[in-house]
Image (cartoon, helix red, strand yellow):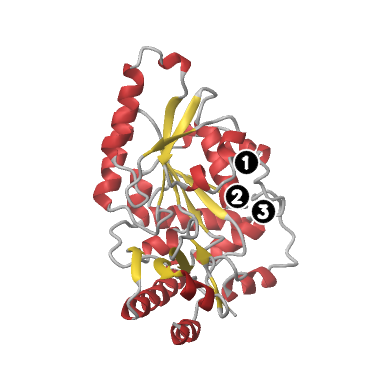
Amino acid sequence: MLHFDCDYMEGAHPEVMRRLVETNLEQTPGYGCDPHTEHARELIRQACGVPQAEVHFLVGGTQTNATVIDGLLRRHEGVLAADSGHINVHEAGAIEAAGHKVLVLPGYDGKVRACDVARYVEEFYRDETWPHMVAPGMLYISHPTEFGTLYTREELEELHAVCQRLAIPLYLDGARLGYGLAADGNTLSLRDIARLCDIFYIGGTKVGALFGEAVVITRPELLPHFFTLVKQHGALLAKGRLLGIQFETLFTDDLYLRIARQAITTARKLKEAFRAKGYRIHIDSPTNQQFFVLPNREIDRLSQYATFELWGPRGEEESVVRFVTSWATTDEQIDELIARL
């Protein structure tokens, strides 16, 4: 059986596993106070071009989003996000469980527009009853989006400018950031993201790590006492060096981007094969997530050989499906799937 459900079905990249085994019997302080974690922080600061940034390592994506958003918002504030945003759809109310509302903006292929952010905030404060409502306190975006689409540099600059004007922080969810940076046509670099976002995270769980995410806070004054908040949210690993070693490895010799490119190469090959067979592309994603419209009978037949995700409710005759490649997907696996089309 072939598996294309998601990009974290495998364990970790062999080089990451090798380093974890090599350092297994080292004795180091806990909670990220070890030399490996500090080195990982410095490597990330260098890659982002932000020597003043704070870097924290958390155990997973949902914990990261919930912790950062809770830390940025005051009790009466909510977070602006696309209607399809991960925090709005697929995090089981984690944001709301911390006492904050997700304030929905229209999404365009998963992205939000600066003009809609401005309109929401300005119309909110024009309403004389606004003290009775949840105030927009920050903006959440992801790169790539839930639909595998990418923000351009110009779009992110526009979002940065409007957030600066409105005095709300801009936070970028980078669960699949490596695949976005490695994608065909991507115009954003890690340094661009660090320059234009107040806080973002570099996803490890989906891009070569066994687990873990690296939060980069380019404006540390926005999140004082963040370490304590991480612990309150259950996102602090006692054996913190296990996170530090993984990111130390991923950010040595450009490993993070090198392995991400493998996912893009195999996804591109998959897309071309589906297109050649006459299947419709639902969303033209340049990343490792690929969306196709298939007849239900073809979905049922392919399901005998491969696992993949039904994207939304099953239609009467055809449905949208998602195939996801990862850093570990091989050409042989793609060839085997293509042979089954």
Please name the amino acid that badge 1 sits on: Val
Give, as a three-letter code, the residue at label 3: Gly
Q: Amino acid at mark 2?
A: Leu
Mark 2 near mark 1, Cβ–Cβ under 8 Å? yes
Q: Residue at x 60, y 80 (%)?
A: 1
- In this picture, residue 166 sits left or right of residue 320: left
Tell me which numbered mark, 3 or 1, is placed earlier along the sequence: 1
Q: Residue at x 43, y 75 (%)?
A: 262
Q: Secondary structure at mark 1?
A: helix
Q: Position of residue 42 (x, y in %)?
A: 49, 54
In the rendered image, which residue does mark 1 sit on?
230
Task: Say which residue label 2 marks.
Answer: 58
Q: Quadrant of the C terminus?
A: bottom left
Q: x, y (%) of residue 136?
A: 42, 28
Q: Which mark is residue 142?
A: none
How dense is the environment of label 2, judged by Cα within 10 Å: few (below 14), some, or many (20 and up)? many
Q: Secondary structure at mark 3?
A: loop
Give the answer, above or below, for where 143 lies relative to 19: above
Which residue carries the number 3 mark?
240
Whichever of labels 2 and 3 marks the residue nearer the N terminus, that label is 2
Q: Nearer the viewer, mark 3 or mark 1?
A: 1
Q: Is residue 12 left or right of residue 220?
A: right
Judge from the rendering whether residue 308 lies leftward or rightward of residue 152; answer left or right: right
